[in-house]
Structure formats: C-alpha cells, structure tokens
C-alpha cells in the first residue's frame, strides 16, 4: 500500500490526530533536535556583545525568559486575534493610565495606524480610501515643530497627509486651518523645540484638534509610560523592543477610546486598508504585555545602579592608559541611561574610531560599539549587556588601545 493511501485511510479513523502524528516528527524528537541545533552556527551568523545600545539593525534588545515563556506557551492553541488585542489592550491601558490600547508592529506602525484613525474615525469607506485624501472629506495636514522633523514623520505621511512645519507659537496658530488633522510631538526633540508639551496641548484644545506623541525610546524613566497619557495627549506611541525588552517587532498605540477603536479599523486582522501588512501575532501581542508588566514591576533603582557599576568598571579599567580619556554621559530624553565616551589622543593612540570599531567587531568575542563624534572616540552603553559582559568589553577595549599605542 502506498503511503498516501495509508494516510487517506487513517484520516477516516476517529483518531485522525494519530495519523498526523505519524507524518510529523514527534514533539519529543523536535525538542531533542532543537536543543542541539545551533541555528546561528548553522546559518553562519555572527553573534556579538551589544555594547552599542538599542538599534533595530542590531536586533534591538533581548527578551527576558518570562517573555519567551509567554511566547512559547501561547503558541499551542488558537484564539481570536481581535479578542487577544481587546484583552491585552485593557491590561496595557490600565498599566499606562490610557483609556484604551493595542499592540502594533513597532512604534512606527503605531504612528501610521494612529494617524489613520484620526483621519477616518469609524467610517469604513474612508478606511478603504486611504492613502487618498483629496475629495474624500478627510483632513490632510499635520502640524509639527521644525526641530521635531527627523524621518519618523514619514510614518504619518504614509496615510497621505502633508506635514506643515512651524517654529513659534504664532506660526503654529497661523498654520491651523480647516484641513488640519492633528498636532504631532516628538518627545525626544522636546528640548530642541520652542513649544513645550503643555503649550502644544493647550493649543490643540483651543482648536479642538487631536494630538499624538512619539515616545518610542523614552523609557527609562518608567513614569514616562503614563506621564503623557496623564498630561492629555490623545495618542501615545512607544516601541516594544527597545528598553522594555518586548518583541522587537511590537509596539504600543494607546490613548483615547474612540481614536484607538478607529485606528484598529486600519489594523490586522481587518483587511482592505493601509495597515494590513502591519501584522503582530498573538504570541508577540501577549509577549508585549508580559514584557511591559515585567518592566513596570522591576526595581528600576537597582537596575540603574547596576548600569552605573558596569560603566564604573569599564571606566576604571581604562584609567591611566596614556592618551585616553573617558566621559560618562546620560542622554536627557531618549535612551536615557549612562553611557561612556572613550576618546584618545591620536598622537599617542594611533588608530581611527572606525578601525577601533572594526577591531572590536572582528575580535573574539565580537563586540559592537558606536563610532562617536570625533575621529578618535567611540561610545558604549551597558544597558543591553548580559551580566558579566562588562568585564570582557573593558578588557578588549584596553587591549586594543594599548596595542594602538605601541
Ligand atoms: C525607534 C523609533 C521609532 C520606530 O520604532 P519601532 O518600534 O522600531 O517601529 C519611532 N520613533 C522614534 C523616535 C524612535 O526612536
């Protein structure tokens, strides 16, 4: 009897699952092979110590065990995707003081879908019309401070809107017209702008316009998760895979109930809209919730102290190397954590920053750092290191600096 016929026959039996079991490797066999299988080696991929930071190109952050457990344990049953978003959304909204929330495919998707919701409201016809705005009755302009323009606003223009830039409050007032859809704020650039959060919100309120804030990489501090909802922004967008250590391809859109409901009309599993490609699976949606919950509950003071200790260890290891200076800096808003800038006098330590980066990358173990502002400096962060890796990073940088000084 041919194998195909055997299967056909078996599928008629009451225990059809048994027939499937005979063609698929048993879960025990899969487990045994996955334990031994080193996919990085098999694929010829370089792994490295991440002393650079939270970079999408470097796969951002590592998910903690509880997030991986959430992902693995939820992969074994079916549920309705919309119900997952409803339930997880309620939990996230409660944690972050928002009326509603859902998990998006990164902060970028949150920006696109939130913008779409502002434009369409609950009108299905409009949802299908995006990114075409002309002749649809939808508004078409978003006002942004000039200093807040940095490429992320492209997420907004995906929906068809045009960006109107302003610098002063007078310019902002003059820019508002009946085509104005929203006022947007990039938290990271707040210190560079002439108009601050509360004035921006006040302006929006006076003109009955919705507001959105992009705070993608802006925890720590943990309080930022609710600060901008409390302050009154209608929509708040954040990355899931940066310091929160959720799935790299997840993010959160949270805010006012009506706008979140409208945004979801452009999001999967619904189709025929601009967001259908921005899918997040149930495992990642739930993984995002667990990551957020775990992030909020961790001891942030202790974590900060741990980062400072790592920085101090590296700084001390590099102290007293001729021609080398180090400086601890903490970015004020985004990626707010202690980092170390390591600079050298090129007359003594004869290596460029790019060559230094390459030496560390090609060394064993491989280490990624960031080329800094001058030709003779690199920058490192320690918040993405695994415990103990600061010792390796310090040792390798010291070796290369001494080597270059010979
Ligand atoms: C990282 C980042 C984004 C994009 O976030 P993803 O989660 O990678 O989609 C948007 N805005 C800012 C300011 C960011 O730093």
Image (spheres, rainbow, N blue to C red):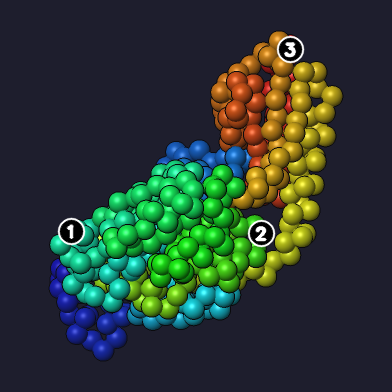
165 shown above or below 8 = above
User: Gap in Å between the C-alphas at discs 2 and 3?
Assistant: 39 Å
Label 3, secondary structure: give it: loop
Pinpoint residue 203: horizontal percent, then vertical percent.
47, 63
Label 2 residue SS: loop
Say if 398 sits above or below 101 in the image.
Answer: above
Which quadrant is home to the N terminus? Answer: bottom left
Local crowd at mark 2 within 10 Å, few (<14), some, or many (≥20)? few
**Residue carrying label 2:** 221
Question: Image quadrant for the C terminus?
Answer: top right
> Disc 1 on helix, strand or loop?
loop
The residue at which mark 3 appears reads as 348
Q: With 23 as the anchor, is 301 left or right in this view?
A: right
Q: Is residue 228 above or below residue 6?
A: above
Mark 2 CB near ligand 1 (8 Å cut): no
**Residue drawn where x is 54% and y is 41% of the image:** 47
- Residue 26 vs residue 86, the one in the foreground: 86
The answer to which image quadrant residue 42 occupies is top left
Q: Which residue is mark 1?
A: 134
Q: Are marks 2 and 3 in contact (CB under 8 Å)?
A: no
Q: Is residue 131 visible?
A: yes
Residue 10: give x, y in percent of width and height.
Answer: 22, 80
């Amino acid at each position: 009897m041919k194998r195909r016929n055997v299967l056909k026959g078996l599928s008629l039996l009451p225990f059809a699952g048994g027939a499937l079991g005979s063609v698929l490797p048993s879960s025990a066999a899969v487990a045994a092979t996955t334990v031994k299988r080193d996919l990085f080696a098999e694929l010829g991929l370089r792994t490295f110590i991440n002393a650079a930071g939270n970079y999408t190109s470097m796969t951002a952050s590592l998910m903690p065990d509880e997030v991986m457990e959430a992902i693995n344990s939820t992969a074994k049953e079916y549920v309705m995707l919309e119900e997952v978003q409803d339930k997880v959304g309620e939990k996230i909204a409660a944690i972050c003081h928002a009326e509603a929330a859902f998990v998006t495919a990164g902060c970028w998707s949150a920006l696109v879908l939130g913008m779409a919701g502002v434009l369409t409201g609950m009108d299905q016809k409009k949802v299908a019309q995006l990114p075409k705005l002309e002749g649809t009755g939808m508004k078409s302009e978003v006002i942004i401070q000039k200093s807040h323009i940095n490429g992320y606003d492209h997420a907004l223009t995906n929906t068809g809107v045009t960006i109107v830039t302003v610098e002063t409050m007078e310019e902002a007032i003059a820019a508002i017209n009946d085509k104005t859809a929203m006022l947007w704020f990039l938290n990271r650039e707040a210190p560079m702008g002439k108009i601050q959060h509360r004035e921006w919100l006040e302006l929006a309120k006076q003109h009955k316009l919705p507001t959105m804030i992009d705070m993608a990489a802006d925890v720590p501090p943990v309080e930022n998760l609710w600060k901008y909802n409390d302050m009154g922004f209608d929509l708040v967008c954040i990355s899931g895979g940066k310091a929160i250590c959720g799935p790299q391809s997840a993010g959160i859109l949270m805010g006012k109930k009506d706008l979140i409901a409208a945004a979801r009309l452009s999001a999967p599993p619904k189709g025929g809209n601009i967001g259908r490609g921005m899918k997040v699976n149930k495992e990642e949606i739930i993984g995002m919730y667990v990551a957020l919950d775990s992030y909020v509950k961790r001891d942030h003071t202790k974590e900060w102290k741990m980062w400072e200790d790592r920085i101090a260890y590296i700084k001390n290891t590099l102290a007293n190397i001729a021609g080398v200076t180090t400086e601890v800096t903490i970015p004020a808003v985004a990626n707010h954590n202690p980092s170390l800038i390591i600079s050298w006098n090129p007359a003594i330590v004869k290596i460029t920053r790019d060559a230094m980066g390459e030496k560390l990358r090609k060394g064993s173990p491989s280490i990624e750092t960031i080329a800094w502002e001058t030709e003779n400096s690199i920058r490192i962060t320690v918040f993405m290191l695994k415990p103990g890796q600061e010792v390796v990073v310090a040792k390798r940088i010291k070796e290369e600096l001494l080597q270059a000084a010979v």
